[in-house]
Amino acid sequence: MIDYLREIISGTWSLFVGLGITIRYFFQPVVTVQYPYQTLPMTPRFRGHIELVKDEETGETKCIVCGMCQKACPSNCITVNGEKREGVKGKVLTEYTLDFTKCSLCGLCVESCTPKAITFSKDYNLAGVKKEAYIFDLKKRLEAKN
Amino acid sequence: MYVDPEIIRLLAFLVGVIAFAALNAAYLVWLERKEAAHIQRRIGPKEVGPFGLFQPLVDGIKLMTKQLIVPAGVDPVLFKIAPILVMVPAIMSFVTIPFGETLVARNLDIGLLAIFAFASVNVLGLLLGAWGSRNKYAVISAARVVSQNVAYEIPMLVTVVTLVMITGTMNLHTIVLQQQGGFWHWNIFNLSASPLMPVAFLIFFVCMLAETNRAPFDMAEAESELVAGAFTEYSGMGFGVFFMGEYANIVIGASMATILFLGGWDCPLGLFPGVLWFLIKMYFLIFTVIWIRWTFPRTTFYGLLNLSWKILIPISFFNLILTSAMLKVF
Amino acid sequence: MNCAAIKQKLSAVGAEAISETEYDRKGFALDVQVAPEQLVAAVSVLDAEGFFIEAVTGVDWLGEQAALRKEAEAKVAAEAKAKADAATAAGEEPPPAEPVAEQGELPEDALEAVYDFNHYESLCRVTIRTRMPRSKPEVPTISQIYPGANWHERETHDFFGIKFVGHPYLVPLLLPEDADFHPLLKDFRP
Amino acid sequence: MSAFAESEANETFVLNLGPQHPATHGVLRVKLTMDGEYIVEAEPVLGYIHRMHEKMGENRTWAQFLPNTGRMDYLHALAFNHGYVSVVERAAGIEVPERAEYLRVITSELNRVSSHLLWFGAFILDLGGFSPLLYAFDDREHILDLLESVTGSRLTYCYFRFGGVYNDIDDNFVAGARAFIKRLRDRMPMYHNLVTKNIILMKRLQEVGPISAEMCRKYGATGPVCRGSGINFDVRKHEPYSIYPEMDFEVPVYEQGDSMARYMVRMDEIEQSLRIVEQALDKLPEGPVMAEKVPKIIKPPKGDYYHAVETARGSFGVRVVSDGSNTPYRLKLRSPTFSNLSLYGEACRGMLLPDALALMGSLDLVIPEIDR
């Protein structure tokens, strides 16, 4: 009988304790970020989709068309093409396509790049209605930036 | 042409009551969302109007423009009648609730009985809707609703009987009048009648939660178990009416607790009684109901049966016996 | 309970080969090779010792026999070449090349079922392997000893087509209900 | 009358719980044969998000498989990373610098806390309590922010590499981790007051869904499920890997075997993980985070290798068979919840639906890891 009453009282008390906790939070300020109006800065290491890096001296890409990124990619979403040109040492980049629909943002390509010609963008507001919009021509993007 | 002013008064009250019930149902959804959000440290609805105040309006329009799907295989009559059976009794109950000294549509001598009779129809509506929609989850929900009904009605009515013994009347208006003059006159603190009155209030409140299918007793809906329970097959306004009925029932339950235990329109300090006090008390109770929902996990229906038969019923009977003994002695 | 005792008990039921492996190098302590017929007996020993089942899986050794033969042939050829070289170096006439022995048809490649067992108290992971011909991949089920093997065997059946004889419910688990292909076989082409 | 009183066999009905159901957390389907609300038989149906990771592994180089590991158990991705890099390091004989091992343990223990927090919220959500989920997410967000600042990602980290880790941590991370430990320690009593000691929760979990130690053994259950049944088995203690032998922590074990025991094991593990992180931060040595002599193309010698790690849900083992080439010959992923879920059919027989769902929640299912 005593156990019975004790359980009722302790049980009821536990319920009031719970209510006390939630009401305390009720009067505390909210912690959420109101996304479209407020945004958080991206951390420097954020792994967005990749983009080509501009060489500060020449203003051109640093890519030497070695194809290491293409080989490192587990999902085969990078296509790199280059050609030999007169008077230029090494190959010249003609195409750098990222099929972002297949990319899993693992970053193995960036790691494999010896000349550090690709980097992660901090772009995360990616939404669209067409698949084609996500086949990025990174070379054009770089040129558009210039 | 002579028209009885009583009829005009009744009609005005009817319109008022329906408007009150619908407005409450709509804005309690807003309150629920806002309160839940703040308990969880979010903001909640904020896009439509200031503080999201027009959100219920938009929701209502959305629900009304949606197609009313009547799935193949359901019992068409039961399926359609069920939401109405939940909503209409709730509105009917408002007729006899005294919001203020003079603010009552029809003061019945058996007001208490009428309200509890109407309140039980709610269960019938849920049962019919669940059964009629021929969905396995809904059928399980129907079984739960009935077992839940058995569980809470007894302690609730025993508590009310205790109260009727003290007051000696079933007229809600008279019950409130007896409690006038400050919070120490309220039934919840009427310790000379029975020292267990605060406990009786708790029992009544718990049973009210169960009656209105609110958490932690929302086994009929139990979205993490039964998807949406009785409402699984309902769409558009069919679901909307169920929803509004649920909130209307909460308003009834909170009003009843206010009238029976908290002195109705009486001011706690005995000054300036009025409808405002009634509303403050009622909305505070509704706030508590929502607060409870966003705090506790759900019980199981056998948990509710255990609670009812092992704890609530013995205590309420004990209270009944104690009260009658004290009435006899003093 | 120690690994040596288990080793003895397993060899008592007729395991074909048991080797203690270096744990740090391989990650398991006992590597047991049994014939399909002895499997149930060997697993019963582990059950009696309180092991729990970690996983059941398979390995397809398609092309193993060909590779082995190639290796052997290369070895023979290398030996012959070494001999010839030695002879030339010694100024002798190189001996005539021996005719390559007819080796007949390749023995059939095998499918291997691999069972991993582990013990809750002591560190002794036992790997039991059993081989069966690819054309008739059948091995008795152990789901009556370890009910947990039920799903693992179904999964292995999905992926390799190994039939666990006596299994109560050998229908696809992870693959679609009507799957009749076995994706982890090396000759599987989607 | 005859329509109602048929033979007994017809009184059961089949309820398809899932594949889209709020309580199955993903796409698990459980075919329940019910007698009223009692479960006569439960048969989990798997494979709705089966992706054949094992075959993918055979078609990729050893390094290319790395991103896949985080996509099996997305809640404790780093432990799966850890298991895979460890087995390849074992096979190829790659030494890992000490600092890298410390970073692995720090990040994967933080990840374990985040996984347990999410489980906590989702479990209470299964039981019908809403707010604890959001509180747990609030705390978890801090871990995700910390891990994002190191790994660059919030869910599928892919942070470990053969021979070390991808990035070094900075002082901000250390300070942030310490602040987080303090914060969570302050919050734990709140969780216990709000949830653990709540009478409703106790009634729902105590003596519900018992799993015996023998059943765990027969089904190969590991992790909190077996530790809630009185079996003291934790891979971190049992076959120590990385720097766990140097850490001072306890393995919480509860004897009851009911849902409450599993709940308590996980809640206690949060504190133990915080202890490990704290110690590792104290002892963190200087040095490189990547071994110097890691070949660009990894070709482990022939043979097969096994390595197990303790994830938030139990023992995750990887068996690789190498034929000496640059791709795995065979890659077996032994996921813990696959075994843990396999006992569900037996465990929930004769239970009521709400209790069976509480039991399912207490198993802490992550469907992609079961289906792989």
Image (tube, coloured by chain):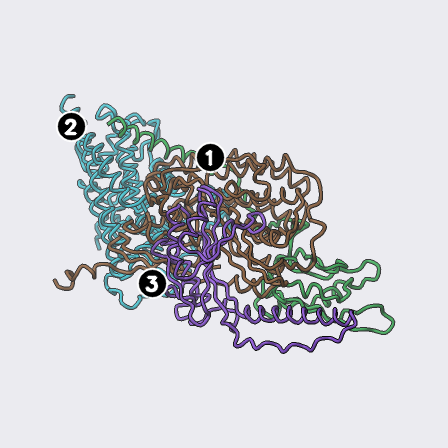
- What amino acid type is highlighted by mark number 2? Ser
Chain C on-screen colour: purple
Residue D117 visible: no
Give the chain ID for the green colour: A
In the picture of the structure, the residue carrying the numbered disc 3 is C166
Q: Nearer the viewer, residue B58 or A56?
A: A56
Q: Tag on residue D190?
A: 1
Chain B on-screen colour: cyan
Asked if both marks, 1 and 2, belong to the same chain, the answer given is no
Q: Return the chain for callout 3.
A: C
Q: CA distance from mark 1 to mark 2?
A: 44 Å
For the point 58% across and 68% down, which residue is it?
Answer: C68
Q: Is residue D282 left or right of residue C174?
A: right
Q: How many residues crowd around disc 2 within 10 Å: few (fewer than 14), some, or many (20 or more)?
A: some
In the picture of the structure, the residue carrying the numbered disc 2 is B324
- Location of residue D344 in the rendering, given as x and y in whole percent from the top left corner: 36, 52
